[in-house]
């Protein structure tokens, strides 16, 4: 699974505001839990959880804007998704500060995110994050992956 957008970190109050006020979304179960089997056909291989390798992978991507090591998401640390059904974000508060922190890597960098529809991609490329979020939600559900709540890693 991969999100349409990334928020590296989000505050607990922003999560509560997003989920507690219309439009309501939902939070996914924790993904990439340490020890969780990646592929049922090969139960020996598991996610690492938060460790030196997964922290370094996330830091490398965040700080140097590089793609995933080997082009796969298996080295990423635990994270969650905020998910919103289609057309539930129409009229959402344009002033919500977290919208400024939405992130998508440059097109040439592989992070494995879910592709945006053309209209949302056009808004994103023009620097209009709010409009990109809404445009994507108008054609289907939208997900935002996040790795930290405040400054705390998710376990």
Image: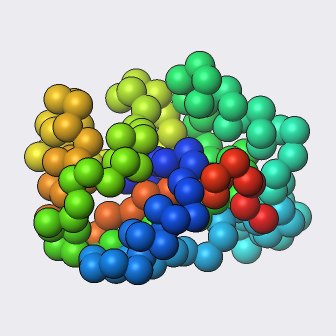
Horizontal side of 65 relative to 136 (left or right) equals right
Residue 18 lies, in percent from the top left, at 39, 69
**In the rendered image, which quarter is residue 26 located in?**
bottom left
| Total numbered badges shown on the rendered structure | 0
Q: In which quarter of the image is the C terminus?
A: bottom right
Residue 99 lies, in percent from the top left, at 34, 48
- The image shows residue 69, relative to residue 129, as above or below, that is above
- The image shows residue 126, relative to residue 80, as above or below, that is above
Horizontal side of 68 relative to 109 (left or right) equals right
The structure's colour scheme is rainbow
| Residue at point 17%, 29% (across, down) | 126
Q: Can residue 35 be seen in this view?
A: yes
Q: Can residue 139 be seen in this view?
A: no
Residue 123 lies, in percent from the top left, at 16, 39
Residue 68 lies, in percent from the top left, at 60, 34
| Residue at point 43%, 58% (across, down) | 144
Observer-nearest of 131 and 94: 94
| Residue at point 51%, 39% (across, down) | 111
| Residue at point 77%, 33% (across, down) | 56
- The image shows residue 50, relative to residue 29, as above or below, that is above
- The image shows residue 19, relative to residue 108, as above or below, that is below
Horizontal side of 104 relative to 80 (left or right) equals left
């Amino acid at each position: 699974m991969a999100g349409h957008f990334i928020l590296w970190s989000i505050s607990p109050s922003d999560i509560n505001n997003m989920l507690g006020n219309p439009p309501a979304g939902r939070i996914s179960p924790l993904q990439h839990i340490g020890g969780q089997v990646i592929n049922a056909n090969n139960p020996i291989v598991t996610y690492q959880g938060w460790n030196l390798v997964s922290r370094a992978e996330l830091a490398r991507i965040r700080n140097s804007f590089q793609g995933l090591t080997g082009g796969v998401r298996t080295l990423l640390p635990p994270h969650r998704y905020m998910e919103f059904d289609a057309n539930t974000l129409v009229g959402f508060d344009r002033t919500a500060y977290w919208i400024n922190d939405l992130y998508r890597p440059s097109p040439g960098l592989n992070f494995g995110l879910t592709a945006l529809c053309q209209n949302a991609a056009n808004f994103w490329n023009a620097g209009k994050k709010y409009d990109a979020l809404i445009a994507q939600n108008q054609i289907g559900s939208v997900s935002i992956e996040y790795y930290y709540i405040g400054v705390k890693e998710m376990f």
